[in-house]
Every structure is written in C-alpha cells, then in structure tokens.
Image: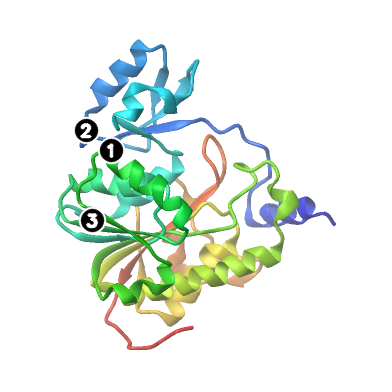
Amino acid sequence: MSSKQFFIKRYKKLGWEYKQVQLTQAIRVNTINSNLDTVVSRLTSLGIELEKISFLNDGFWVKKSKFSLGATAEYLLGLYSIQEAAAQIPATLFTNQKGKTILDACASPGGKTVQLANLMNNTGVIIALEIKERKMFALTNHLERCRVTNTAAYNMDAKEVTKLDMKFDCVLLDMPCSGNPITDKNWFNKRTIDDVHINARRQRQILNQAVKVTNNGGEIVYATCSMEPEENEQNIDWALGRLPVKVEPIKCYGEKGLTNVFDKQLNTSIKDCKRVWPDQTQGFFVCKLKKQEDKNEDII
C-alpha cells in the first residue's frame, strides 16, 4: 500500500473522504494600524476583489487579484497580514486578552503574534519564541512592519521555556506538525506514520512545558495544521490524563473533535475541540485548555 493510499484510508475511517481542495487565499486586517473599511476600500481601488470570511471578524477571502498581495504598499505599511483562514482562529479564542502576559511558543513567521497584538491593542506583553535562528528575521520584520510594540522575540526552543522564569496568563501553541496534503502537493511522498509519531511526541513535550509556565486558571490554545489524530485529539487525551488541564468549550468554525479514534475511546470532553476538514481552508485542529492547580509532577 502506498503512503497516499494509507493516509486516505485513515481519513475515511475518521469521517472524511479525501479530495484535493483548491485553497482560497485569505488576509487579515491589522486593526491597530487601520480599520476594515479603509483597507477594503484601498485594496478594492487596486482591483482586488475581497469577500468577508463569515467565521472571522477581521478576515477576508481574496477572490481575485492580478498581483501578489505581498507586493502592495498597504502590505508593506502593515495594514494587513496574509494569513490562511483557519490559522486566524486560534488567537481569537482567549478570554479578554488586553493587558495580559501571553506566550506565543512557536511564533514564526509571526502572523498569529501580530494578531494577538491586535486583539490586545498593543497592551500587556507577548513573549514570542522561535527555535530556528534563520526564521527570526521573518518574525521580527513582521512585528516591526505591523507596528507591534508589546512583543519581545526570543530565539528559543519552546521545550526550554521554563528558563525564562516567567508565568503566563495565556499560551498559544501553534505546534510544529506534520502539515497536510492540501497545502503541500508532495506531502504523500514525504510523510510516513513514523513522522507523525515523532511530531506527536515533540508536541507533548512542548505542551508539558507550556503547562508549567501557565498561571493557575490560565488558558492554553493548542493548534495544528495536521489532520492526524495522533497530533490532535490523542495528544489532548494524553494531556487530560497526565497534566493539570481541562478542555474548555469554544465557539468557532469547525466540527466537533473526535472522541473515538480507530475504535479507541478518548475523553468525551474532546468533543469540545474543533476539527476543520479541508474546504476553502487547509485541514486544521484547535483546542482550548484551562490550567488547573499544579500537581507538581514532571511528565516526560
């Protein structure tokens, strides 16, 4: 059985019939720099056709454009970010972000960091981590271009976040993951189930450390652009059994999280997570966790 046949068979068991989807490009207006009407008006005057994304406050589908959206004066001025629609969901799920201390644990290229700063109106503090030094320029450039003033960026592995000796009200975990075949046409040729298991273990390590630096009662948003349950529902099931967290219900685009994966029953609260199967967007998974009282355990 080929890798493609293997994964497609898995998706069918999970409830999705594989089909190659044509993604629609999306942008998000940076509201600390401008407002929706102004940006839409300016882009429309350039011949760009936009359509409001129904499940996002500041997001728009790009229905038609004769040139790159990264080549406009408006983009260079930081009036908007080019950001995949599903990827705009996680940052919106925190409660009352303004004035809080927030960790963006896997930040580059910075779209979600800028989005957090927008939602915070540049108040409070964001600590943005990026493990790869070569990606730090993209992150810091994005922050500067979009006039973000409440963020400090560190070249650091999220698994070492306890070295900062800080506690956070909110933690965004946009996890490094296996990706999905909708955004990468060569995905089936280079991904194996072993890759999925390796990524899932790394994600658990990051999640474990993130919980340690979250204040009691604080919020953790866990997200991936992977469709593999090992990196999504099964990791949340692992966390619920070992870490002081519980799943919080969220209202956003997507279907209920899977609570039965390949005939294995998971914690029923995982239904309150959201799984986005590809349509106009890529495949995506998002879950909100609330930190409970520390158990003082070190999970490896």
Viewer-closest of 7 and 35: 35
The residue labelled by disc 3 is 95
Q: From the viewer's perspective, is the residue at label 2 or at label 3 nearer?
A: 2
Q: Pick the residue in front: 244 or 141.
A: 141
Image quadrant assignment for residue 143: top left
Percent coordinates x, y for residue 149 in the rendering: 20, 47
Q: Does dot 1 land on a helix, a strand or a loop?
A: loop
Q: Amino acid at mark 2?
A: Asn
Q: Amino acid at mark 1?
A: Cys
Which residue bears the numbered disc 1? 146
Extreme residue in the right direction: 1
Q: Secondary structure at mark 3?
A: loop
Q: Nearer the viewer, mark 1 or mark 3?
A: 1
Distance of mark 2 from mark 3, alpha carbons? 22 Å
Q: Is residue 292 visible?
A: yes
Few, some or many C-alpha atoms within 10 Å of disc 3 (few <14, some 14-19, many ≥20)? few
- Which residue is disc 2 drawn over? 33
Gap in Å between the C-alphas at discs 1 and 3?
Answer: 23 Å
Marks 2 and 3, the one that precedes in the sequence: 2
Query: Taking 149 as reference, is 243 above or below it?
Result: below
Q: Please give the name of the residue rendered at 82% of the width and 54% of the height, measured from the top-left corner.
A: 2
Cβ–Cβ under 8 Å for marks 2 and 1: yes
Image quadrant containing the N terminus: bottom right
